[in-house]
């Protein structure tokens, strides 16, 4: 059954236009069922030696305390922005929100990270050098800008659809990029997405078939969402119960959502959320679910009891009711990334990285703060 769907993760959506870079919305990815786990693609990836080779399997993020989750998120996002530039959602503040959604199960218990998204986050928290980050971002090896030239974005190679860089958005000719001819990369699988391109512009998107789409629907586990004629959906295999479902409502338009993995009981699907002590409670997928906005954003007054926008985005209430920042900044060696009105500060030196710098990556986008490479 094909159902109309409204907007998805509005806080993460960027515009898509020729001549302007596009940053797509939160969690979308081409079906993860045809992607091999990272360690099966590259046994030398940084986490493979201690988890897979030891027979322990992928890291259980839910075994971490909130303090461990935040510490590992800071490391993953600081190194990602330093080594690959803060392009797209590599930007420190936005990356921190995404990383905490994956790493902090006490804050986000009902949509735990799954599949290739989990593998990618599992790789990043264990990095110790930019070469390690490259392996997490580019499973089949770094991409070259040779012959590309100019300020452009594109999608990685897709020679082997089961094990390639096709989900990676690459950029050439941008400030703060790695030296030489190597491209910078934003691995869309971290957000549960894949890469799509139109001309010299690429974005993390809901389908690798292109940026255009005509219908909002569930297609297997993948949630397709059209806005402005472009697909910026999510593969629900990247989180929660790994299912996309339709949820009709008597009081409002029907929608599709990624089904939550919750034992809190069934509820009437609803497009609103309530807040209690910084925690948002909602029912977009027919089961009661919650998210600790105060923990996620690291500040009080971080939950707004509003209609979910879109109606399946259980994270949309997590926004500073009184914004403490509007943009990224550098202060000596401290980076401050800004996301959803919340500041995310970090001491670059404590991460073994160089000084904070303001980097302009996507065309027509404001600069983002990032640590310098080590």
Image (spheres, rainbow, N blue to C red):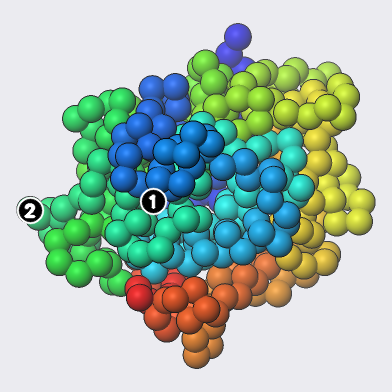
Q: Residue at x 23, y 57 (%)?
A: 183
Looking at the image, can residue 231 be seen?
Answer: no
Residue 36, how many percent across, how many down?
Answer: 38, 28
Q: CA distance from mark 2 to mark 1?
A: 30 Å
Residue 127 location, quadrant: bottom left
Task: Choose the circle earlier in sequence order: 2 or 1.
Answer: 1
Residue lying at the far right in this picture: please name it.
276
Looking at the image, can residue 141 be seen?
Answer: yes
Q: Is residue 372 above or below residue 151?
A: below
Q: Is residue 291 above or below residue 341?
A: above
Front of the two marks 2 and 1: 1
Q: Residue at x 38, y 28 (%)?
A: 35
* Residue 309 relative to residue 367: left or right: right
Return the mark for residue 147: 2
Residue 231, how many percent across, how many down?
Answer: 45, 33
Quadrant where the C terminus sits is bottom left
């Amino acid at each position: 059954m094909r159902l109309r769907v409204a907007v998805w993760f509005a806080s993460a959506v960027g515009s898509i236009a020729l001549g302007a870079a596009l940053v797509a919305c939160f969690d979308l990815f081409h079906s993860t069922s045809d992607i091999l786990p990272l360690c099966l693609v590259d046994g030398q990836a940084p986490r493979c030696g201690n988890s897979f080779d030891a027979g322990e399997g992928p890291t259980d993020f839910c075994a971490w305390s909130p303090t461990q989750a935040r510490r590992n998120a800071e490391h993953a996002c600081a190194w990602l922005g330093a080594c690959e530039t803060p392009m797209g959602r590599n930007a420190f503040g936005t990356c921190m929100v995404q990383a905490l959604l994956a790493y902090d199960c006490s804050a986000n218990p009902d949509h735990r990270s799954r599949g290739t998204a989990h593998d990618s986050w599992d790789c990043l928290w264990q990095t110790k050098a930019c070469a390690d980050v490259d392996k997490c971002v580019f499973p089949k090896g770094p991409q070259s800008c040779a012959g590309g030239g100019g300020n452009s974005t594109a999608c990685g190679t897709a020679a082997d659809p089961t094990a390639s860089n096709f989900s990676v958005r690459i950029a050439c000719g941008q400030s703060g990029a790695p030296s030489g001819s190597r491209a910078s990369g934003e691995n869309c699988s971290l957000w549960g997405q894949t890469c799509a391109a139109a001309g010299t512009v690429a974005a993390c998107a809901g389908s690798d078939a292109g940026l255009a789409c005509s219908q909002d629907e569930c297609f297997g586990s993948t949630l397709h969402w059209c806005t402005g004629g472009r697909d910026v959906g999510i593969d629900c295999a990247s989180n929660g119960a790994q299912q996309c479902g339709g949820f009709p409502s008597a009081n409002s338009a029907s929608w599709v959502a990624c089904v939550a993995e919750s034992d809190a009981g069934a509820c009437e699907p609803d497009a609103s959320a309530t807040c209690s002590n910084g925690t948002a409670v909602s029912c977009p997928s027919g089961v009661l679910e919650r998210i600790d906005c105060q923990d996620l954003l690291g500040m009080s007054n971080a939950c707004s009891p509003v209609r979910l926008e879109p109606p399946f985005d259980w994270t949309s209430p997590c926004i500073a009711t009184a914004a403490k920042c509007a943009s990224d900044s550098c202060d000596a060696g401290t980076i401050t990334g800004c996301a959803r009105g919340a500041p995310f500060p970090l001491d670059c030196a404590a991460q073994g990285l160089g000084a904070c710098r303001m980097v302009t990556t996507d065309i027509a986008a404001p600069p983002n703060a990032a640590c310098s490479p080590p």
